[in-house]
Amino acid sequence: MSTPAATPAPSLEELRRYAIARSLFKPTTLPTAIRKLGFVQADPMRAPARAQDLILRHRVKDYRAGDLERRYTRLAVEEDCFVNYGFLPRQHLALLHPREPRRSWDAKTRAQAEQLLAVVRERGPTHPKQLLEEFSHHGRMPGYWGGELNVSTQLLDGLHYRSQLRVKRRDAGTRVYEAVQHPEAEQSPAARQARAEALLDMVVALYAPLPAPSLGYLTSLLGYGAPQLRAETRQAFQRAKARYAHAQIDGRTWFWPADENPRSKRHRLDTQLRMLAPFDPVVWDRRRFQLLWGWEYKFEAYTPAPKRKMGHYALPLLWGDAMLGWANLRLEKDGRLQHELGFVHGRPKGAAFKLALEEELQRVSEFLGLDSPA
């Protein structure tokens, strides 16, 4: 592959506009939006909706909370692991599977998992609840965030990760599994390197423009989705300057797809105010966030309440190319949507911001299926 042609370095302002415009494309259909993104990070927390829904609402025309789950079985989409857990086009599974975990199960755990897998293969799509009583002898284990979890539930998750199960659908938010057999992957050095490079291309396409340390961090996170390609993804990262367009800006190297131009005049922004999910591609990289907007955004859902500065689930407030601050949204028992705002440099004055805020709250209310915000 030839080295991408050198182009004049964009300014930080141009880079900021490019980062927003390329990710917040014109709303389209759900399949097209997922294909354009390549990956949509998932999170079970509702505040006031799940992360995947909050991400898609800006990119899918007339999207409503839960549409992805409701339409999942009709989409060429899979729940799986990439740099995090989420949803990705089915065509990308061949880059990730068969997956070879870094840590093997011991004999006891492997035997328990094989028992569960045999039952799912026999019965077809299986809800975990159908197995909990039958395999209650598997016991319980400590949960990641405290409390205890059923061992069988964790084994199902492990079988999914180990390429033995897939998520057929969700019933009221719970994953229903079915057995799957992924095709064997070619193991020649060239084929392995090609898969690793394709995965890194997906990362750059989703999160660009990326400062070099962030690209390195995301490369390490690919060890979650494709641990069997860790060496190859590192090699792909080491060749980043030969594969991606790049420039030195204020002493830092930034990367973006070779066929894109951050300085292009087509990267125009609208005047719509947007409340972004904490895992939205525009704000996901906290290092990039601080470089582009000059302040530190933190996700504090797991921070003890007395120590929070922004709130339980602060949604960054984007207006044009300005990241004004954050919003916390809350659904009251009577169905009303309440909001609290925080600003980095003070609340904008004038009618334009007031109108933009009212319109965004109305859009959120419609997305949640509410009559109107409070």
Image: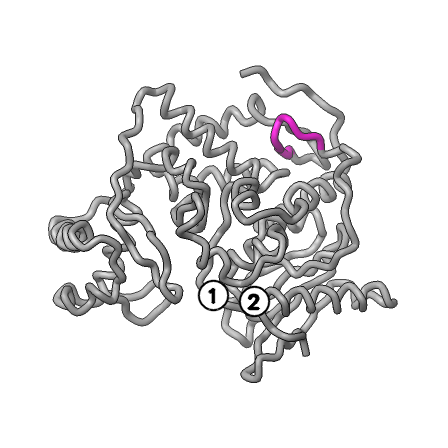
Mark 2 lies on residue: 313
Badge 1 crowding class, 10 Å Cα cut-off, few under 14, some 14 to 19, many 20 or more, is few
Please tell me which residue is depicted at 54% across the width and 83% down the height of the picture.
Answer: 333
Residue extending furthest front?
74
Position of 205 compared to 271: left or right?
Answer: left
Q: Earlier in the sequence, mark 1 or mark 2?
A: 1
The relative height of residue 242 versus residue 270 in the rendered view (above or below) is: above
- Magenta span of residues: 253-261
The amino acid type of the residue labelled 1 equals: Met
Position of 145 compared to 126: left or right?
Answer: right
The relative height of residue 219 versus residue 315 in the rendered view (above or below) is: above
Residue 45's tag is 1
Residue 257 among magenta residues = yes
The amino acid type of the residue labelled 2 equals: Tyr
What is the x, y in percent for residue 121?
Answer: 18, 49
What is the x, y in percent for residue 5?
Answer: 67, 19
Please tell me which residue is depicted at 51% across the width and 67% down the height of the picture.
Answer: 301
Residue 83 appears in view:
no
Q: Is 338 or 183 nearer to us in this picture? A: 183
Name the quarter where the C terminus is drawn: bottom right
Please tell me which residue is depicted at 28% across the width and 54% down the height of the picture.
Answer: 177
The relative height of residue 114 versus residue 216 in the rendered view (above or below) is: below
Residue 341 among magenta residues = no
Total label count? 2
Determine whether the residue tagged by mark 2 lies in a helix, strand or loop: loop
Residue extending furthest top?
2
What is the x, y in percent for residue 103?
Answer: 25, 44
Please tell me which residue is depicted at 63% across the width and 38% down the height of the picture.
Answer: 209
Q: Give yes or no for contact between labels 1 and 2 (Cβ–Cβ under 8 Å).
A: yes
What is the x, y in percent for residue 357?
Answer: 75, 66
